[in-house]
């Protein structure tokens, strides 16, 4: 029988080794690049102004160490500060990145939550390095939002009335809880275990009651664009109840503008709102500012292009692009219907001809839609209404393609109407956009959007595991989102960095 060597390590015995920590960071790897760049080519001296311990006070963990550790942790799918801190205790790569230091999880958590403003500077530093490697084209960007829950309770969300109702429910629950406990005491049913459970539950309920009563005392109703009041949240009032493809979440939308050359995120920010479209002007300004700062020039005679989905389609947003000399490619909500089932679609404004002198619209059947009156929809959307005669529409051969009502055409009570708002009147930016998107050239360009922005979000969500913002308040969530976008950009640099250093595979 063959004889093999055995060691004690096979039996779980530990081994003392004398190692050089930095040698554990092998060239070609992400951690090697991270160790080389942070504090070197990526300047992080802005963090120094946070520390006032030059004369008195204890020595602090260098920000360079914390940044390297947090970026490494995030890149490995760890979003909790406790888990990132644990890495330094038993993971040799983390030990090498932190030079053997072991920051406590509270140090990591407070560093992430208190430096959101400085992360913006670091984000631009990383961006400048991406530009140095030639990864940024600077001509075409896709802007979109990634909807994620945050550390806020969806149950404690509602309008003032709803929250007041819930507050009463909590109070009733607390009273019933006390009554039940009294009964148990009187009947001699109390045990040590029931007493402990009672104390725990009572503590939780009274905390919730105090929190809600404090919130309700200082509450200001949030005004919505189309509804009178939008929901507030007791745990994080800057977050919003957002609709996603799988239901409602309480959280934020992580916005990002992504460059088309290598999917580098050129600007990012968090929005605590259901309507991501209203943040487009801000995103445009941030994108232009960052691109300017890193010195990426636009080829002469070219215009920058922004692509977004229909959530961003509005007259104000298209005007904002025009004012900044940017070419927008943003479809309206009917774009897909127009592009696909042309046969089944209902006649829309572009199928009606406007006669300016007499102020009426002519329908596809040649009938008149007369100006009726100004109209206000949802209390906010103003427009002029043009209506066809109900008699004409009842007997029209085209009425199934034109009238929305599911009734028998002969039984309809109103003729077809058109609401002309500032976004669909002749010469509006929205109308121009609709016309542009009827051309193959624009449609082809728009088809690229999904391949630019979605891989970046997929990487952040599925490879880095960001399925929840762990912080509260817009400022802090913004900082966390910027950090994730920074990690994404750094990972994109790895290939070019290795080529530059001569480690190319
Ligand atoms: S249904 Fe009325 S508005 Fe529509 S095409 Fe016929 S007549 Fe014109």
Image (cartoon, helix red, strand yellow):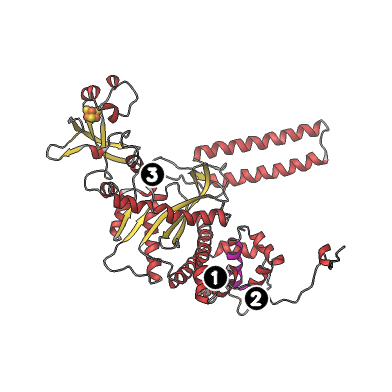
Q: Is residue 352 visible?
A: yes
Helix, strand or loop status at disc 2: helix
Say which quadrant the C terminus sits in.
bottom right
Which residue is located at x 60 percent, y 58 percent?
Answer: 77
Where, quadrant-wise, is the N terminus in this rendering? bottom right
| Front-most of residues 33 and 472 | 33
SS state under label 1: loop
Distance (Cα) linking label 3 and label 2: 55 Å
Residue 329 placement, left or right of 37: left
Q: Which residues are magenta?
A: 56-74
> Is the shortest distance between ligand 1 and the CB of mark 3 under 8 Å?
no
Q: Earlier in the sequence, mark 3 or mark 2?
A: 2
**Residue 107 or residue 141, whichever sits in front:** 141
Instruction: Measuring from the top left, give residue 62's x and y in whole percent.
Output: 61, 73
- From this view, report whether residue 206 is shown above or below residue 3: above
Measured as percent of width and height from the top left, residue 168 is found at: 59, 36
What residue is pinned by disc 3?
Answer: 225
* Numbered badge on residue 22: 2
Q: Is mark 2 within 8 Å of ligand 1?
A: no
Q: CA distance from mark 1 to mark 2?
A: 22 Å
Bin the neighbour count of mark 3 within 10 Å (Cα to Cα): few under 14, some 14-19, many 20 and up: few
Magenta span includes 60: yes
Residue named by callout 1: 505
User: Which mark sits nearer the N-terminus, 1 or 3?
Assistant: 3
Label 3: which secondary element: loop
């Amino acid at each position: 029988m063959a004889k093999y060597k055995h060691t004690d390590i096979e039996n779980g015995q530990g081994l003392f080794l004398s190692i050089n920590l930095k040698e554990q960071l092998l060239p070609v790897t992400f951690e090697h690049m991270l160790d080389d760049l942070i504090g070197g080519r990526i300047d992080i001296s802005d963090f120094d102004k946070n520390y006032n311990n030059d004369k008195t006070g204890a020595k602090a963990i260098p920000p360079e160490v914390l940044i390297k550790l947090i970026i490494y942790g995030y890149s490995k799918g760890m979003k909790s500060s406790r888990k990132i801190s644990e890495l330094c205790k038993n993971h040799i790569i983390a030990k090498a990145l932190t030079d053997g230091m072991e920051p406590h999880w509270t140090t990591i958590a407070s560093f992430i939550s208190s430096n959101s403003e400085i992360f913006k500077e670091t984000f631009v530093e990383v961006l400048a390095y991406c530009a140095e490697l030639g990864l940024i084209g600077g001509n075409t960007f896709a802007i979109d939002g990634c909807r994620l829950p945050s550390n806020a309770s969806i149950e404690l969300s509602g309008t003032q009335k709803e929250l007041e109702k819930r507050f009463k429910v909590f109070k009733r629950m607390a009273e019933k809880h006390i009554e039940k406990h009294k009964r148990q005491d009187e009947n001699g049913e109390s045990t040590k275990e029931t007493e402990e459970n009672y104390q725990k539950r009572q503590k939780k309920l009274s905390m919730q009651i105090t929190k809600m009563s404090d919130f309700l005392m200082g509450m200001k109703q949030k005004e919505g664009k189309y509804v009178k009041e939008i929901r507030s949240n007791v745990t994080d009032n800057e977050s919003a109840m957002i609709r996603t493809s799988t239901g409602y979440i309480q959280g934020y939308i992580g916005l990002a503008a992504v460059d088309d050359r290598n999917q580098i995120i050129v600007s990012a920010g968090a929005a605590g709102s259901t309507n991501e479209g209203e943040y487009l002007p801000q995103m445009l300004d941030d994108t232009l500012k960052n691109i300017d700062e890193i010195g990426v020039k636009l080829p002469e005679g070219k215009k920058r292009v922004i692509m977004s989905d229909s959530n961003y389609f509005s007259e104000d947003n298209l005007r904002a692009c025009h004012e900044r000399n940017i070419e927008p490619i943003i479809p309206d909500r009917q774009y897909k219907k127009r592009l696909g089932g042309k046969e089944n679609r209902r006649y829309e404004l572009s199928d009606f001809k406007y006669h300016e002198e007499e102020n009426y619209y002519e329908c596809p059947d040649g009938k008149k839609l007369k100006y009726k009156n100004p109209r206000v929809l949802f209390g906010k959307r103003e427009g002029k209404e043009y209506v066809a005669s109900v008699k004409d529409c009842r007997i029209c051969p085209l009425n199934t393609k034109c009238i929305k009502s599911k009734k028998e055409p002969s039984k309809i009570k109103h003729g077809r109407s058109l609401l002309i708002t500032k976004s669909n009147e002749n010469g509006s930016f929205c109308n121009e956009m609709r016309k542009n998107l009827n051309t193959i050239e624009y449609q082809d360009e728009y088809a690229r959007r999904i391949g630019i922005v979605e891989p970046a979000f997929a990487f952040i969500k599925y490879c880095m595991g960001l399925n929840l913002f762990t912080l509260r308040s817009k400022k802090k969530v913004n900082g966390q989102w910027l950090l994730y976008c920074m990690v994404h950009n750094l990972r994109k640099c790895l290939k070019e960095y290795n080529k530059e250093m001569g480690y190319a595979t």
